[in-house]
Amino acid sequence: MIEGLLSVSLLIVLLVVGAVVVAGLAVLSGNQGATSKPSTSAQVTSSKESHPVQTYTYSRQNFLFTKAELSFYRALQEATTERYHVLGKVRVADVLKPQTENRGDWQRAFNKISAKHFDFVLCDRDSLKVLAAVELDDSSHQRSDRIKRDDFLNQAVKSAGLPLIRFPVQPAYELEAIQQHIVKTLGLPQPQKAKPNIRLAKPTAN
């Protein structure tokens, strides 16, 4: 009888001791977690301090076009105002897109056009659908790097079925010559010259 009571008492003591040990471990673990969090925060703060965000300053361009580009733009706009809407400095990647299902090839093809632009594009006046690209060629197009760029653009627009019309820089431009060059390149019928509008004078009463 006595031995049974001792066994029960011993079991109770062991259970109490075990509960105390478990509680102590839980408290200790919580304290360690709490002390480790500030350490992580300090590391993040330290990382931000060692890698500050780089900032830059800029100045704005005074004009969108060079003098040569502006002169041609005005002539091109006047020559095409009845049929087209002229946009300037349009990014090639906003007009053409890579034709491939392979993601890697698509990215490489996109990178080839992402930093290039057309001097001008001719768009439908109502829908702004791109109908043709226009390049103004000055003396810089004689350089080897420009020749390589022009060859690439020629191939790119050809593969896309987009007409590319090239004009040389000139001191002055004839509107009719611009119109004829566009019509010829696009394969459009030659516009008929408007007949002079002659009004007959009404007879005056005597």
Image: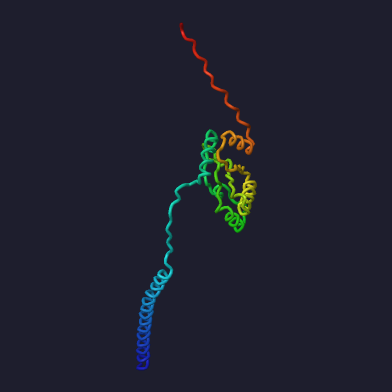
Task: Locate residue 180: give its quadrant.
Answer: top right
Query: How was the colour assigned to the protein in this rendering?
Result: rainbow
Residue 46 locus on image (x, y percent): 40, 72
Total numbered labels placed on residues in the image: 0
- Between 168 and 9, the one lying in front of the other is 168
- Between 162 and 86, the one lying in front of the other is 86
Residue 3 locus on image (x, y percent): 37, 93
Instruction: Tell me what residue is drawn at x 43 percent, y 60 percent.
Output: 56
**Is residue 133 shown to the viewer in this render?**
no
Image position of 11 with respect to 46: above or below: below
- Between 57 and 44, the one lying in front of the other is 57
119 left or right, relative to 148: left
Q: In the current view of this chain or complex, which residue is farthest to the top?
A: 206
Image position of 19 with respect to 155: above or below: below
Task: Locate residue 123: give its quadrant.
Answer: top right
Q: In the current view of this chain or complex, which residue is farthest to the front?
A: 171
Task: Locate residue 6: give its quadrant.
Answer: bottom left
Instruction: Tell me what residue is drawn at x 64 percent, y 49 percent.
Output: 155
Instruction: Tell me what residue is drawn at x 51 percent, y 46 percent.
Output: 66
**Is residue 199 shown to the viewer in this render?**
yes
48 left or right, relative to 184: left
Image position of 78 with respect to 143: above or below: above
Image position of 10 with respect to 32: above or below: below
Instruction: Tell me what residue is drawn at x 57 percent, y 26 percent.
Output: 194
Q: Quadrant of the N terminus?
A: bottom left
Residue 112 locus on image (x, y percent): 59, 55
Residue 131 locus on image (x, y percent): 58, 40
